[in-house]
Amino acid sequence: QVQLMESGGGSVQSGGSLRLSCRVSGYTFSRLCLGWFRQAPGKEREGVAAIGSDGSTSYADSVKGRFTVSKDNADNTLYLLMNSLKPEDTGLYYCAADRQPSGGYCYTGVPENNWYNYWGQGTQVTVSS
């Protein structure tokens, strides 16, 4: 069973930075497709960034140039570095994972909820103006 645990959320002022971490266990980390999502109050959960097992990345337009997704295969950890934060980045941030399809590849593009079967509990990010 793949298990995920986020950390690193907090409260910052507009223009500030945060780095989220997601520790993963229960499966070979290097063979996972991984993503970050967020959910603002009253809104649906949306994809923020994805990283494939091969390290390829993709981002939502709203975060391109400000957020960077990365992973450390040796430490089984997924990261999301968030710079130039805006109040509209406020929300509960989730990491997600799924096994790379046998003989196939991770999906590419802005991540969608139905790409992943395993989810963390979320970490709150609040950006004040």
Image (cartoon, rainbow, N blue to C red):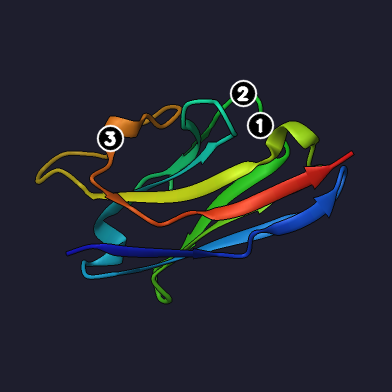
Q: Residues within 10 Å of mark 2 (few under 14, many from 20)?
A: few
| Residue at screen point 43% across, 76% down | 75
- From this viewpoint, is residue 25 visible? yes
Query: Along the horizontal axis of the image, is 19 left or right of 115?
Result: right
Separation (CA) of disc 2 from disc 1: 5 Å
In this figure, which residue is indicated by the disc labeled 1?
64
Query: Along the horizontal axis of the image, is 18 left or right of 73?
Result: right
62 over 94 or under it: above or below: above
- Circle 1: element type: loop
Query: Circles 1 and 3: CB distance less than 8 Å?
Result: no
Tell which circle, 1 or 3, labels the residue nearer the N-terminal end: 1
Q: Residues within 10 Å of mark 1 (few under 14, many from 20)?
A: few
In this figure, which residue is indicated by the disc labeled 3?
115
Please identify the residue farthest to the bottom as the structure is shown. 75
Q: Check residue 61 in the rendering and tell me which mark sits there, or answer none.
A: 2
The C terminus lies in which quarter of the figure? top right
Separation (CA) of disc 2 from disc 3: 19 Å
Residue 92 in the image: x percent, y percent?
56, 46
- Circle 2: element type: loop
**Amino acid beneath label 3:** Trp
Tell which circle, 2 or 3, labels the residue nearer the N-terminal end: 2
